[in-house]
Image (spheres, coloured by chain):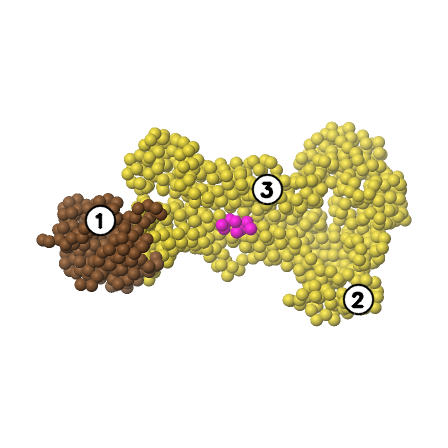
Chain colours: A yellow, B brown
């Protein structure tokens, strides 16, 4: 039986190749989608497990709960491990780097730990060594403090001797416990409390509810008010998964579309094989095949190329996912990350099962065929469909007869036409969706300071890159020099002075990044999701993450504090700035109320006249600033950005193209079946004087109309998919979205996209149509 | 009389090394002639007809129809040649199941781009002449064998071809209907229509054609005038 199926396969190489290709593409896309989805948490979870990360970090007031009392919480039910209490202080540090002019002001959460190891939050020492005395400090990875720097906190100066990573970000820096205690008493804590940090692992910490119950138990075991703050690993995990999470929804959408198209095509191929192989079925039955064996033979006919496609698709999916997963693996230094094994097994199996299931109904039809009828007719009885359409279309004398013959063809096999149309609808919907997504992402790139203000001038010296510019900003003479140099450039469109600062956010492990644009903030290029830009003092715009983390809404007031200064500002707008940071935008004057010394511009961002060569402009500005009377060296740099978007746009283009190709293969299969079934008719047409061009017109028009109609149906489907997926992507990036990102389709683009169905259909039909057009008449006429 | 069909040293081989299906055939058919081509199965009769119709190309030799070198034509030119010069009648009619009698007959004219009223008028005339006008809206499946072949003849004649090629026109019908078809073809020939008919039936050949060409193993074994 297996041999009979394989023999049948040999006679249907084109169909086998099509099954192989469509299953390969759909499996590969699904493996990438599910692989990335499964690994959205993968890197963090691996690092978390390896470092025995803290499920919950508790900050306690040690004036209310003694160290003994705090340590006793380790024996609470559900606590599987605890470390601490570690003396803790939240401070603002001044960082200076040897050989680099200026200093930077950085908020730091400093914990006192004797060693980096322990039962909870085993720190990974990236560089240097653990502090050996009270004047040494180890900085957290990403704290923008580098080994060799001097960190001044209050009256104490520390030398940075190492860099370590806490997977749950329990602190920004670590010193010895004695130094931390001294630091707390020296700098003073808000409210005057002495604080300690305790790190817990719990038996049930898989959910927000579980964590809440566990922290509740700790809180209950300590005096009222002793617990100042708690941070769950789930919050850190959520903020860390931002890397590839926003891209997963669209990859999933493409994967599902590819799978649906595969199944549709397999249904057509299997039923086509039954129709074309009727004589063979009759012969198989006449030599003793039971109906069940015929069914099995026809299922095998699909199963063999499908299985091969599934395996090859899984391999291709892993290869496609590897570069994206590698980025995350590098971030967490967790070695090699790959598509999880269960995805490699489940996706190919699922795709295989779906395609084989698609083959079952036509295979049952083959099993039920009468032997006599099958052998006598030589082909499946042609349903008397489409006669009326043929007759009516034949009367259209204004349309070439070859075209009307083609237009009538879809009516002859309405089932196949419907399935092919659906495949084109899904393919064209993917094109519409992919095109919209590309426009959305391009707008994200253009709605960023990097695009609107491509050149930045600051007063940095060359050397290690601190996270921010000189804390004191540019001096008045420097400001005059820079603005004069920029104003003198004919290509300068706008000059936007900018300064920034960091503010702690109560109740969060994160701090808010404050950016203050001088002049009109709309020139920053940032898009507003809602509200308006700040127009004076005591107003601010915030990004979505800030809004969700603080509960602030547009129109509400929020009080910022810094070093004892308070400023109540009104949130007047929500800015589109996705990512892991809470961002705030305010005027320099508003920032001055919180940071009187830090409101001077720290850099100048420049918008350029359209068509300006950025590098040439930067060279000209550098030359101008180099000749200016020295007030320190200046740095002229390109704002950059958009690199990740470039890779994602390439991925979108690739997936869209692959799905369009798969849909095209579906059409190719339909046309190949149609030609096979109507080969004799085509021979008759040719014998009666149909030219190759007319044959081409006949066959392409037979799918052209359904391509056009499917394209028209696909456009709203694709637009709807775009409307549904973009918000999910934005949500995964911790952001809302501006209307410009969602309103991407113009009437003309919709018309052009509507034609995509026609293009897919015609492109898919051209191959077999060309073959039919070139075939010698006598050969076609002999065909059955 | 002028030669409508002229074959010179025509050979057709399908596979390299295999014996030719048609070997060095020389044949001339004059305008208005009725020629029967006879021979056993596999002798090369139908291949000869296909070569004359430009539906196949000879491996060597020249084929001229109406003064045109058919063997050198591209597929497009061959299709245009068939519209103008050749009408084909097949053993199994080769009518298109999903088209009515009228649509089947009109098809070659429509493919040739004949204006609709002229094509319709010609089709009506042929349907009347061939006595099937009353079945113009019927589908082929509803027709008898004789009716089907008459529809096929009407379709072959709609573009007023120089030569009518009939491949076993009575092979799929009963004897009486075969007689009827033979008589119809003979009457068309009597009206000046050049006819080349491939047949197994010696009686049909001698009764309705004035010349009988016998083919054996791809070669012309005899070429005789019929004397009545």
Q: Quadrant of the N terminus of chain A?
A: top left
Residue at position x 78%, y 31% in the image: A73
Check the residue under mark 3 and report the chain it is in.
A
Of the pair A757 and A462, the residue shown nearer to us: A462
Mark positioned earlier in the residue sequence (3 or 2): 3
Q: Are the numbered discs 3 and 2 placed on the same chain, yes or no?
A: yes
In this view of the protein, which residue sits in the foreground, A709 or A541?
A709
Does A27 sit left or right of A459 as displayed?
left
The magenta stretch is A654-661
Q: Which residue corresponds to mark 1?
A: B215
Residue where numbered disc 3 is placed? A318
Distance of label 1 from label 3 (alpha carbons): 66 Å
Classified by dominant secondary structure, the portion drawn in magenta counts as helix
Disc 1 from disc 2: Cα separation: 100 Å
Q: Tell me where residue A153 appears, x and y as whole percent.
A: 86, 48
Tell me which residue sits at (79%, 35%) in the image. Answer: A117
The correct choice, above or below, for A584 with respect to A624 in the image is: above
Q: Secondary structure at mark 3?
A: helix
Disc 3 and disc 2: Cα gap in Å? 51 Å
- The x and y percentages for residue A71 are 81, 32
Nearest-to-viewer mark from 1 and 2: 1
Q: Mark 2 sits on what residue?
A: A626
């Amino acid at each position: 039986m297996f041999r009979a199926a394989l023999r049948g396969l040999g006679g249907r190489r084109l169909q086998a190749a099509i099954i192989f290709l469509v299953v390969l593409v759909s499996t590969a896309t699904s493996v990438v989608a599910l692989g990335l989805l499964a690994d959205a948490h993968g890197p963090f979870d691996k690092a978390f497990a390896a470092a025995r990360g803290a499920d919950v970090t508790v900050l306690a007031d040690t004036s209310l709960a003694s160290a003994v009392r705090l340590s006793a919480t380790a024996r609470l039910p559900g606590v599987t491990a605890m470390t601490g209490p570690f003396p803790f202080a939240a401070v603002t540090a001044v960082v200076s780097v040897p050989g680099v002019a200026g200093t930077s002001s950085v908020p730091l959460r400093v914990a006192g730990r004797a060693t980096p190891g322990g039962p909870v939050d085993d720190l990974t020492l990236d560089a240097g060594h653990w502090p050996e005395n009270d004047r040494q400090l180890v900085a957290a990875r990403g704290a923008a403090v580098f080994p060799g720097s001097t960190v001044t906190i209050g009256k104490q100066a520390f030398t940075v001797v190492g860099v370590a990573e806490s997977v749950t970000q329990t602190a920004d820096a670590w010193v010895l416990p004695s130094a931390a205690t001294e630091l707390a008493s020296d700098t003073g804590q808000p409210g005057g409390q002495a604080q300690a940090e305790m790190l817990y692992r719990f038996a049930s910490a898989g959910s927000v509810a579980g964590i809440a119950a566990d922290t509740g138990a700790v809180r209950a075991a300590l005096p009222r008010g002793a617990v100042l703050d708690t941070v769950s690993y789930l919050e850190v995990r959520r903020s860390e998964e931002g890397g590839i999470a926003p891209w997963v929804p669209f990859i999933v959408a493409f994967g599902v579309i590819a799978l649906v198209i595969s199944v549709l095509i397999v249904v057509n191929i299997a039923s086509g094989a039954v129709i074309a192989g009727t004589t063979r079925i009759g012969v198989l039955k006449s030599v003793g095949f039971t109906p069940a064996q015929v069914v099995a033979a026809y299922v095998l006919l699909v199963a063999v190329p499908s299985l091969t496609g599934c395996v090859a698709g899984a391999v291709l999916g892993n290869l496609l996912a590897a570069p994206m997963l590698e980025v995350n693996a590098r971030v967490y230094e967790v070695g090699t990350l790959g598509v999880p094994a269960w995805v490699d097994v489940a996706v190919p199996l699922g795709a295989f099962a779906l395609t084989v299931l698609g083959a079952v109904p036509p295979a049952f039809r083959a099993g039920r065929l009468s032997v006599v009828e099958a052998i006598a007719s030589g082909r499946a009885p042609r349903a008397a469909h489409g006669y009326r359409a043929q007759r009516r279309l034949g009367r259209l004398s204004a349309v070439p007869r070859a075209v009307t013959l083609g237009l009538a063809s879809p009516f002859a096999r309405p089932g196949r036409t419907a399935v092919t149309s659906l495949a084109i609808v899904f393919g064209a919907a993917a094109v519409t969706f992919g095109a919209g997504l590309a426009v959305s992402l391009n707008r994200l790139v253009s709605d960023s300071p990097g695009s609107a203000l491509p050149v930045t001038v600051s007063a940095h010296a060359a050397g290690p890159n601190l996270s921010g510019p000189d804390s004191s900003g540019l001096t008045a003479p420097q400001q005059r020099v820079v603005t004069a140099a920029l104003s003198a450039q004919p290509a300068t469109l706008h000059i936007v002075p900018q300064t920034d600062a960091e503010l702690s956010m109560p109740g969060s492990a994160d701090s808010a990044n404050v950016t203050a644009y001088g002049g009109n903030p709309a020139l920053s290029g940032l898009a507003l999701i809602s509200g308006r830009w700040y127009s004076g003092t005591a107003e601010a715009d915030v990004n979505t993450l800030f809004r969700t983390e603080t509960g602030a809404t547009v129109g509400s007031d929020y009080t910022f504090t810094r070093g004892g200064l308070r400023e109540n500002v009104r949130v007047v707008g929500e800015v589109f700035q996705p990512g892991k940071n809470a961002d705030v935008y305010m005027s320099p004057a508003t920032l001055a109320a919180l940071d009187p010394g830090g409101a001077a511009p720290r850099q100048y961002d420049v918008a350029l006249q359209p068509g300006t060569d950025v590098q040439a402009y930067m060279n000209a500005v550098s030359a101008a600033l180099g000749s200016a009377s020295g007030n320190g060296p200046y740095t002229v740099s390109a704002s950059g950005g958009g690199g990740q978007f470039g890779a994602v746009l390439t991925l979108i283009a690739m997936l869209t193209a692959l799905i369009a190709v798969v849909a095209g293969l579906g059409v190719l299969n339909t046309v190949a079946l149609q030609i096979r079934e109507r080969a004799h008719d085509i021979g008759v047409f040719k014998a009666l004087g149909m030219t190759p061009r007319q044959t081409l017109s006949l066959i392409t028009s037979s799918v052209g109309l359904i391509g056009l109609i499917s394209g028209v149906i696909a456009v709203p489907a694709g637009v709807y998919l775009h409307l549904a997926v973009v918000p999910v992507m934005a949500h995964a990036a911790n952001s809302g979205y501006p209307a410009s990102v969602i309103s991407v389709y113009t009437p003309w683009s919709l018309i052009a996209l509507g034609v995509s169905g026609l293009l897919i259909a015609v492109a898919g039909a051209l191959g077999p149509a060309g073959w039919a057009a070139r075939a010698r008449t006598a050969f076609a006429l002999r065909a059955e | 009389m002028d030669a409508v069909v002229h074959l010179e040293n025509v050979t057709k081989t399908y596979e390299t090394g295999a014996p030719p299906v048609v070997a060095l055939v020389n044949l001339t058919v004059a305008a208005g002639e009725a020629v029967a081509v006879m021979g056993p199965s596999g002798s090369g009769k139908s291949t000869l007809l296909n070569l004359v119709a430009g539906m196949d190309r000879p491996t060597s030799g020249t084929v001229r129809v109406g003064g045109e070198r058919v063997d050198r034509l591209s597929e497009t030119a061959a299709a245009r040649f068939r519209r103008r010069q050749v009408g084909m009648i097949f053993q199994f009619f080769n009518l298109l199941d999903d088209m009515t009698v009228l649509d089947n007959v009109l098809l070659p004219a429509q493919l040739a781009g004949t204006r609709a009223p002229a094509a319709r008028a010609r089709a009506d005339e042929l349907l009347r002449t061939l006595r099937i006008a009353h079945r113009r809206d019927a589908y082929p499946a509803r027709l008898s064998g004789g009716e089907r072949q008459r529809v096929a003849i009407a379709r072959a004649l709609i573009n007023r071809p120089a030569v009518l090629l009939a491949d076993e026109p009575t092979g799929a019908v009963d004897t009486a209907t075969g007689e009827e078809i033979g008589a119809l073809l003979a009457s068309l020939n009597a009206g000046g229509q050049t006819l080349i008919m491939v047949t197994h039936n010696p009686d049909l050949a001698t009764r309705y054609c004035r010349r009988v060409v016998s083919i054996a193993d791809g070669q012309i074994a005899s070429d005789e005038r019929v004397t009545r």
